[in-house]
Amino acid sequence: MSGQALQESLSALMDNETDELELRRLLAVSGEGETRATWARYQVARAVMHKELLLPHLDLAAKVSAALADEPQVKVARRMPWTGLGRLAVAASVTVAVLAGVRLYNQDDITSTQLAQSTAQPMLSAPHLQGPAILAGYNANASAEQGVRVNAARTAELTWQQQRLPAYVRQHAQQAAAAGSQTAVPYARAASLENR
Amino acid sequence: MGRLGTFLLTAWLAVPAQAAALPADTAQAWLERLQTAEQQHSYQGTFVYERNGSFSTHAIWHRVEASGQVRERLLQLDGPLQEMVRLDAQLQCISSPQVEQRASVSGLVMQQLRPAQLAAHYDLRILGQSRVAGHAAVVLALLPRDQYRYGLELHLDQQTGLALKSLLLNEQGQLLERFQFTQLDSRDALSDAALQPGADCVAVPVAPAAPAVVSPWQASWLPPGFNLTSTEQRIAQSASEPLTWLLFSDGLAQFSVFIEASPGTEIENMHRQLGPTVVVSQQRQGVSGPVMVTVVGEVPLIAAERVALSMGLVAEQATP
């Protein structure tokens, strides 16, 4: 298996797009240090992209190999008339192993999405501002603070951000209000930050 | 139908054509009127401000003094009392807990709206006519020519050129904020009493003109058309890295860059959206340890992130 083809296959596996044959080829070379390293790098890259917590011991290849080892049909299957069935069984359990890993990722995805919604962009995820529901006492700052509390684990960081960012936003808005040609808009923007 | 019918049809067609032929009939000319309108007309009115998650009502008193200076008082009418009085760009008083921060800011130059310059980065168009706060208005659109700024819809008073309504829109056309007059009177003279601040408006001392500061931090990339309009540096008591504050503008949108010493711990990069305002903060290596680079402004996230990434020490950039 050439280097580039291998990388493509690994990438496909990351996206859960490998077929059985490709998966087997990958598993055959998965013992090689380089392949493992590439796979690990992909996982790190993916985790970074999704801002997930790294799970250092999650090794999908090991799980899939184990699943295959528990499949006695594999060797017999070729000589048996119900070959197709055996292949199906293998495919099924490989799928389960891959899905198990994927589900883990997906759970992290969901968590990170929820966090992103509650902390990173509380305003954009809220319904659009034309609705009357928002006008009646909906307080975006409060919801942002709640989101912040959810993330209490990252206290140091949030303390800095909680301390400094509101001051920055206020300073920017007040500066813009003083220097801008259309004073009223930046002034109202600054004022809206104080409405708690 | 005959001759009469043809005549009526022609007359009917001629009416909207005539209405469209207003004193200044290009978007650029209207923006020029807006620029001078604030310096020419005294007015008082009430307006609403709405952004995602916030809605408030305000009163404004705006008087052009005999000297040509503009005195303006703004007061929030609902919720906590908030007030601001300014004379041209100099803040006179503000009812905010952050007064000490503002006290050191000086020598601000009123930002000029330069339609010709704006036209390079915004597609200026007249969309039509509308009616806001009982006034006939002309509707302008300032559509961004790139992804680094937001679009603006402006409704200008046909009589005075004052902005009666402005809507800020993101790249998907979603409304980020609304400013809209509900009542505006530009005929009656304003009394001194109307411009007198309330007791809670804390006077802002006039700071001596600070010497021009050259920041050691510079942006190696800025969205086209954005220029540095103000620089400020302050030495914080406990930090080795001074707080640097840079303000950039393209003539319409503004963003600030803040750089200060990081508290030491590893702080993850983050971004937040507060209505029209985006906040991006990133940790970076400074002269003497890690610093936090924070971009705050009414620009799309992509612009703020690129600016934050491009911030570097001047010496660093001299030797690439």
Image (cartoon, rainbow, N blue to C red):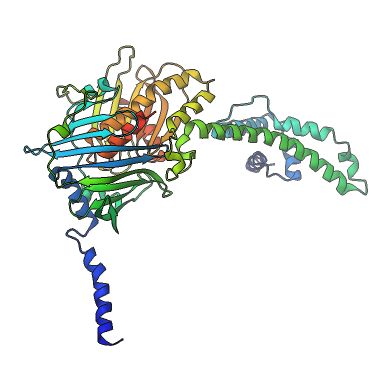
- Vertical side of A32 occupied by B38: above or below: below
Is residue B227 at least partly visible in the picture?
Answer: no
Q: Position of residue A89 (x, y in %)?
A: 84, 42
In this view, B11 is above or below A156 = below
Is residue B320 or residue A187 the one in the foreground? A187
Q: Position of residue B296 (x, y in %)?
A: 35, 32
Q: Nearer the viewer, residue A150 or B109?
A: A150
Residue at (17, 23) in percent of width and height: B210
The x, y position of residue A194, in whole percent, is 35, 28
Q: Assign the C terminus of chain A to one quadrant of the image.
A: top left
The single residue placed furthest to the bottom in the displayed view is: B2
- What residue appears at the point 16 percent right and 23 percent down from the top-left corner? B206
Q: Is residue B318 left or right of residue B188?
A: right
Residue at the extreme left of the image, as rendered = B66
Q: Is residue B19 left or right of residue A97?
A: left
Residue B21 seen in this snapshot: yes
**Quadrant of the image containing the N terminus of chain A:** top right
Instruction: Single out the residue that lies furthest toward the top.
Output: B238
